Amino acid sequence: MNSKEIILTVLEASGGSVQGKTRLQKVIYFLSILLDVDLNYEPHYFGPYSGFVDESLMDLTGIGFVKESCTGFGYPDKKGFEYRRFDYEITPDGNKLLENIKEKSEGDYEKVLTAVAELGELPDYFVLSIAAKIFYVIREKGEVTRRGFKEEARKLEWGDIDDGNIDTALDFLTSRGFVTITKET
């Protein structure tokens, strides 16, 4: 499956829509790992990000297969821009395309659905983002301590991540079999 087909399938498997571009990026990041598909994820402000996936999402939106809506929150970030969230919903035309994808997918469609089901109920976008950051560092560096992760997070300009959020993210990662935790010495 290509990235556009994966996006449409994820939207369908998520009840037809996903709230937040960050959330969608992180769900697809974890799916790319489960499905062993390289979607060119790189470190970014909110964790692993794929320009390739973002471009595919823009294409789907531009063609009319996915509807994008924006919710402003009425207050500015540090740079003076309003905080806002972009939500994505599959359109009727997107559903028609998805029917074609199902027919020609040769089992890939079912693999994506199974992978989404394996992820289970997801934490909020913030914790999902931290989980993706932790897993990205582990994949790049191998085994890593909490202190080692925090150092890498600072190097990647992800800021200071508190221990409570790390614990919640690790709970997500361990419960899905992405990592195992050993005691630090």
Image (cartoon, rainbow, N blue to C red):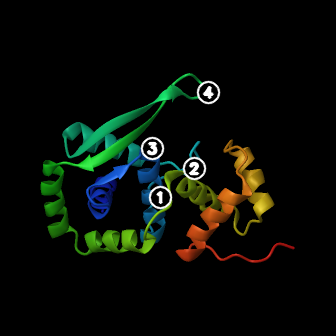
Q: Are marks 2 and 1 in contact (CB under 8 Å)?
A: yes
Q: Mark 2 Cα within 10 Å, few/some/many (few <14, many 20+)?
A: many
User: Which residue carries the number 3 mark?
Assistant: 51
Q: Amino acid at mark 2?
A: Gly
Q: Quadrant of the N terminus?
A: bottom left
Q: Earlier in the sequence, mark 2 or mark 1?
A: 1
Residue 29 marker: 1
Q: Name the side, left or right, on which 125 lies relative to 67.
A: right
Tell me which numbered mark, 3 or 1, is placed earlier along the sequence. 1
Frontmost of labels 3 and 1 is 1
Residue 110 or residue 164, whichever sits in front = 164
- The image quadrant of residue 178 is bottom right
Q: CA distance from mark 3 to mark 1?
A: 12 Å
* Kind of residue indicated by mark 1: Tyr
How far apart are labels 1 and 4 at the CA level?
27 Å
The structure residue drawn at horizontal position 46% and vertical position 63%, both measured from the top left corner, is: 122
Examine the image and state in which quarter residue 181 appears. Answer: bottom right
Q: Position of residue 42 (x, y in %)?
A: 55, 49
Q: Residue at x 41, y 52 (%)?
A: 24
Name above or below for residue 27 compared with residue 58.
Answer: below
Q: Residues within 10 Å of mark 1 (few under 14, many from 20)?
A: many
Which residue in the structure is indicated by mark 2?
47
Determine the residue located farthest toward the top in the rendered image: 80
